[in-house]
Image: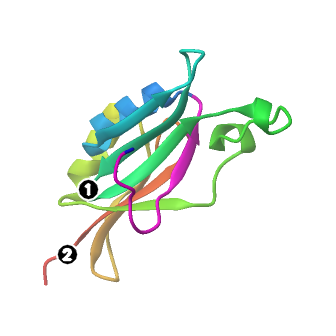
Amino acid sequence: MPELATGVVPHLCVDNGAAAIEFYKNAFGASELSRVPDRDGKRLMHASLGINGGEIYLSDDYPEYRGGKSNTPKAIGGNPVVLHLNVVNCDEAVKKAVAAGAKCTMQPADMFWGARYAQIVDPFGYTWALMHPLQK
């Protein structure tokens, strides 16, 4: 068993775990730490990714364990949680994420609190805030 992550670890439910791993690698430079495929050979029971010094878990959707109801953001009509990622360059991070398949929902802009900030929605329905501090 790999070493357990510390702190709060988001666990994302997605509709294609293998594709999600590839997206996060391409968009955010994620590293795959572990992958546990289901016996069916199609879905992922669990995966762990390292992103920018943090960790996220993800798994494929298993509606059969929730009375036939899907639990992905796409299926339930969105997700109120925003995943925040501090980056070196907000504009470049947005370009990279969009090139990997994300949709930019808030263009990079200088904010009153002293940061360059933007938001994207990944292909699996999760919103990400990307930010870097502005020079003083």
- Asked if the magenta segment contains residue 92, the reply would be no
Q: Say which residue appears at 64% left-offset and 33% top-offset.
A: 61
Q: Mark 1 is on which residue type? A: Asn
Q: Is residue 19 left or right of residue 81?
A: left
- Residue at the front extreme of this rendering: 1
Whether residue 101 is visible here, answered yes or no, is no
Q: Mark 2 is on which residue type? A: Leu
- Tally of numbered discs: 2
- Asked if the magenta segment contains residue 5, the reply would be yes
The tag earlier along the polypeptide, 1 or 2, is 1
Q: Is residue 71 left or right of residue 16?
A: right
Q: Quadrant of residue 68?
A: top right
Q: Position of residue 105 (x, y in %)?
A: 47, 51
Q: Which mark is residue 52?
A: 1
Question: Local crowd at mark 2 within 10 Å, few (<14), some, or many (≥20)?
Answer: few
Q: 27 and 60: which one is in front?
A: 60
Q: Say which residue appears at 59% left-offset and 42% top-offset.
A: 13
Secondary structure at numbered mark 1: loop
The quarter in which the N terminus is drawn is: top left
Residue identified by numbered label 2:
134
Q: Which residues are magenta?
A: 2-15
Whether residue 6 is visible here, answered yes or no, is yes
